[in-house]
Amino acid sequence: MKVLLIEDRKWSSWEEMTEALLSHKEIELSFCDSNQATNVLRHFPVDVCVIDACTGSDRQTITTALARKIKEFYKGTMIAVSAIPYSRIPLLRAGCTYCCSKGNLPKILILLASLLAAKKQPPRVIAGDIFSPAV
């Protein structure tokens, strides 16, 4: 499963996330900043697009407009991530399929990879803080 993580700087939980995914060779992580996101998604196959809800050096730039723009042409799974639950809601409304905390992202990616490998549809509700806007 190819995953594109759109974020402008590494999170404090970055090492934990990458360590949690080390044994899962079926998950290929790629990274880009918000300025490169649409170009990367248009030219490279990606199964899951993960969007950090807040970007910029001051972490005050909300990525809702970016999520809307991506949703116009990208039909894969989109996950909004933020340590702040209310920051995820605008991205769900903009077209993200799921949302979760940054700490839960590895678990969600592992679950989605296993469902993709088994050719099963992901559930509408995956875990307590991960949900579909349709729920």
Image (cartoon, rainbow, N blue to C red):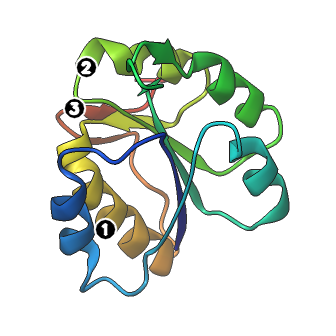
Q: Position of residue 5 (x, y in %)?
A: 49, 52
Point out the image quarter for the C terminus.
Answer: top left
Sequence order check, earlier mark of 2 and 1 = 2
Q: Residue at x 27, y 73 (%)?
A: 21
**Residue at x 55% of width, y 22% of height:** 63
Q: CA distance from mark 2 to mark 1?
A: 21 Å
Describe residue 114's horizontal placement relative to residue 43 as left or right: left
**Disc 3 + disc 2, Cβ < 8 Å:** yes
Work out whether mark 1 precedes mark 3 in sequence or the reverse, and give the earlier one: 1
- Secondary structure at badge 3 equals loop
For mark 2, give the secondary structure. helix
> CA–CA distance between discs 3 and 2?
8 Å
- Labelled disc at residue 85: 2
Q: Nearer the viewer, residue 72 or 82?
A: 82
From the top left corner, tell me how far across and down residue 129 is, in percent.
Answer: 22, 32
Asked which quadrant contains residue 101, the reply is top left
- Pointer 1 residue: 110
**Residue 129 circle label:** 3
**36 displayed left or right of 80:** right
Q: Is residue 98 above or below residue 120?
A: above
The amino acid marked with disc number 2 is: Pro
